[in-house]
Structure formats: C-alpha cells, structure tokens
Amino acid sequence: MKFLTHIRMMLLCLHIVMIQSHEHSNTIVFDTPDSSCHKLSIGLENSITYLTKKWQLHGLAPISYPSVFNNYIAHAYSELYQQDIIIKIGQSNDECKALEYFQGNGMVELLDYDLEHFALLLQYIPSNITLADYLCITQDDNLAISAFVDVFKRIHASPKHLTVAHYVKLEDELFLLHSYNFTKIPAHLLQKACNLYGQLFRSDTPEYLLHGDLHCRNILQNDNEFIAIDPWASVGPLTYEAASFLTSPTDFLLLHDTIQDILQNRLNRLSDELQLDKQQLRDFSFIRLIYLACICETKNRNDDWIEQFIQVAQVVNRLNI
C-alpha cells in the first residue's frame, strides 16, 4: 500500500511539472461574465501589441497553469528594463494595488503597470518551483510549513488597518456562499459554511490587506527564499491568510492516508507560530474550501476540483482545537 501511494505521489509531481512547463498559443478566452473583462478578451491581441511596444518586449512566450480564473501570462525580455520579465493581463486592477502596497516584501516585485489594459510587468523568477513542487520533492511537510510561515511574516511584518472602501472585502467575496442555488455541494456542508460565515465576520474583528489566495502554488522559490505571487487583494482577518495554505494542495494531501494528522500538525503549528486563534483558523479553512467549490460550480469547472475541496473540508471538520 505504501509503495502504491509513493508511485501515485511521483506521478502527481510529474503531472505538476508538465502543467507548469506547457506552453500554449496566444488564444486566450476570459470566462467571466463581467463586461469590462469581456472587452479585454475581445481586445487581448491589441493589448498585447500595445504593451509589447510600450515595454519593448522580445521573445514573448505564453505560460499555462491550472487556475479557477483565466489570465494571460507570458515570459519575455524587456529591452526597456534590461531584464527578463513576466507580463500579466488580468481581470481587474486589484492585484496591482496589492503589489504596490506590499512593495516586494515577501511578494513578487512590481516593475510597472498599465491600468487601462489591466496589465502588470513583474519580476521574473527563473526557478518556477512552487511550494507545492517543493513539498512534493522533499516529502517534508514541516519544511513547507516553515517556508510558509516565513513568507507570511515578511508580507505582514507591519500589518495596517485599511480604508476598506479602496479594496474588496473578504466578507463580500465569501457572500457567494449565500447567493447561488448550488447543486454539486452537499447541503449540510454548505449550511455549515454559511453558519460559520455569520460567526466569523463580526464588527470587532480587525481587518488587514491580505494576499487573499496564499496557497502552495502561489508561492515560488527564489534562490534561498520563497515569495508570493498572484495576490487577490482582499481585506479581512489575518487568520484567513493562513487558512489558504493550511489545506493546500488538496490533490497532494488526498494521496496520504495520514491527511488528518498532516492537517492537525499544520493547524497546531500555524496557530502557535503566527499567534492565530486555532478555532478561527480551522473554521476559515473549512469556509474557504466550500467557497472554492462554489466558485468552481458557478464557473462550470472540473467536478474533480469540487470533489477534492469537499473531501478535504470533511477532514478539516474533524480537526481538534
């Protein structure tokens, strides 16, 4: 049994590497109903042409990676900046605001941006090794936890209360739990998530600017440290930031018969080392998984993703506090 599990983990590692190394054509379809994003989809080729000239880009090589949301991402060389870069054309300017706020502290460096085209010019990280890859290679979850804790502490070294009007509130994002007739998510799990939502978002809970999606595949190795990429830029409790990591990557975790022990150790260490409330951390982890399953259903994503989120949520529900 252990031999078969080891083979499955090796195949998963190979699958991750193949996904990250795959290149595709310049044809990108943005699957969001938002009108501004629809215009971006139609004008993507024109945006690429304009930005290529603006930033003097050469050797544009599009990058594909698994995500709930679709963005145009490519590696190129910028003659203007005299360095390799990543160009990203997204669906809003929230990521730009977050990267400006964090100013490279534990996060990828923002070199330039174009608000009209929802475009970012980003630091290029040559290794392309995510924390998920690192975990898959080392098979040492405690090393992965330590790497995450370091990134978290650098990002939130001096957390500040914000004027939330300038950013999307996590509370509003997670309200999706209440606002759709979901058919692929067990009713009792959805109801539990809705109940926890009402308990966790209280008026006296301090709110900070979060990365908002700080899972293992949004953390890249850069020389001797790890840095975060792709912030969602939500305003909410710091506990949610750690919840993003606690249950990722779900496909890797589900290969282990000891998944509950792994998650319990993560819960204990993250709570202790980051001084976060253990029950809130567990509850936010549960809510996040159900929320991600909800997003997948609204966007008609692969049902396998929904099933993974549900399975891990059921394990989280059994963790001790």
Image (cartoon, grey):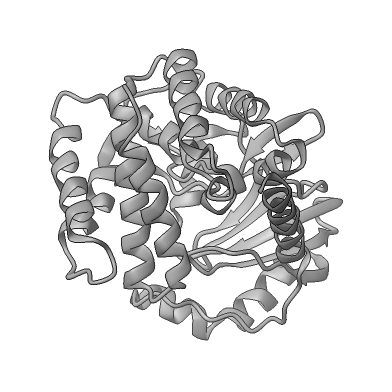
Residue most extreme to the front: 1
Q: Quadrant of residue 253?
A: top right
Please, is residue 309 above or below residue 228 in the view? Answer: below
Q: How many marks?
A: 0
Q: Is residue 155 left or right of residue 45?
A: left
Name which residue lies at 69% across and 78% down. Answer: 49
Q: Position of residue 39 (x, y in %)?
A: 44, 81
Q: Is residue 178 left or right of residue 244?
A: left
Q: Is residue 193 left or right of residue 144?
A: left
Q: Position of residue 159 (x, y in %)?
A: 42, 22
Q: Position of residue 144 (x, y in %)?
A: 64, 31
Please, is residue 82 above or below residue 158 in the view? Answer: below
Name which residue lies at 44% across and 77% down. Answer: 31
Q: Position of residue 281 (x, y in %)?
A: 35, 29
Name which residue lies at 39% across and 67% down. Answer: 296
Q: Is residue 208 left or right of residue 22?
A: left
Please, is residue 270 above or below residue 59 in the view? Answer: above
Q: Is residue 235 visible?
A: no
Q: Is residue 74 visible?
A: yes
Name which residue lies at 45% across and 40% down. Answer: 244
Which quarter of the rendered picture does the C terminus lie within? top left
Q: Nearer the viewer, residue 235 or 101?
A: 235
